[in-house]
Structures are given as C-alpha cells and as structure tokens.
Amino acid sequence: MSGIAIKSKPADQVRADVPVHKVGKGETVRLNINIDKEERAQWKRAAIDLDTDVTTLVHEAVRKYLREHGKA
C-alpha cells in the first residue's frame, strides 16, 4: 500500500497549471499523496483518455467511493 503524506497549501500558492478551480466548493486546499510511479502514470493515461486531468479523476473517484460506502 502506498504511504500518504498530507500537506495543505493555500490554493493561491499552487502552480498555475494545477486546476484547483475545478474541485470542490468552498475553500480549496492542496492534497499531496505518495504513490507508485507506474500507478501515477496509469492515472495520467486514464485522465487523458477521459479528456480530464488527474485532479478531477481522483476527486470524482473519491466522491464515488464515499457515496457507495455511505460516507457522503
């Protein structure tokens, strides 16, 4: 299992190419995770195939997971 490192950064301090405006409502914070390099590449390919970005892909996957498990 991949380790998770959680660090917050104000959205106005995030790189310009990070689509922070596409996620969530309210105050946006940055979430960093450590994953296997190949897994990250798979996520990037999936995002390209779906004409989206990795941030949106992960955000939607977590929302779906939470809905399915009665947490949202």
Image (spheres, rainbow, N blue to C red):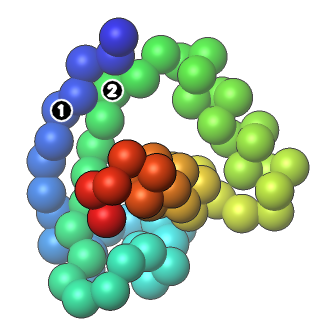
Left or right side of 58 for 1: left
Residue located at (24% from left, 88% from top): 26
Residue 38: percent from the left, percent from the top? Answer: 61, 16
- Residue 44 drawn above or below residue 61: above
Quadrant position of the C terminus in the picture:
bottom left
> What residue is shown with label 1?
5
Three-letter amino acid code of the residue under disc 2: Asn
Q: Is residue 62 visible?
A: no
Residue located at (18% from left, 32% from top): 5
Q: Is residue 46 visible?
A: yes
Residue 10: percent from the left, percent from the top? Answer: 17, 72
Number of residues whose C-alpha sits closer than 10 Å to that of mark 1, classed few (under 14), some (14–19) or many (20 or more): few
Secondary structure beneath label 2: loop
Front-most of residues 26 and 8: 26
Three-letter amino acid code of the residue under disc 1: Ala
Q: Quadrant of residue 35?
A: top left
Number of residues whose C-alpha sits closer than 10 Å to that of mark 2, classed few (under 14), some (14–19) or many (20 or more): few
- Residue 16 drawn above or below residue 35: below
Q: Which mark is residue 34?
A: 2
Report the residue that reaches farthest toward the right: 49
Residue located at (20% from left, 84% from top): 27
The mark that comes first in sequence, 2 or 1, is 1
Q: Tags 2 and 1 in contact by the CB under 8 Å rule?
A: yes
Residue located at (69% from left, 29% from top): 42
Report the residue that reaches farthest toward the bottom: 26
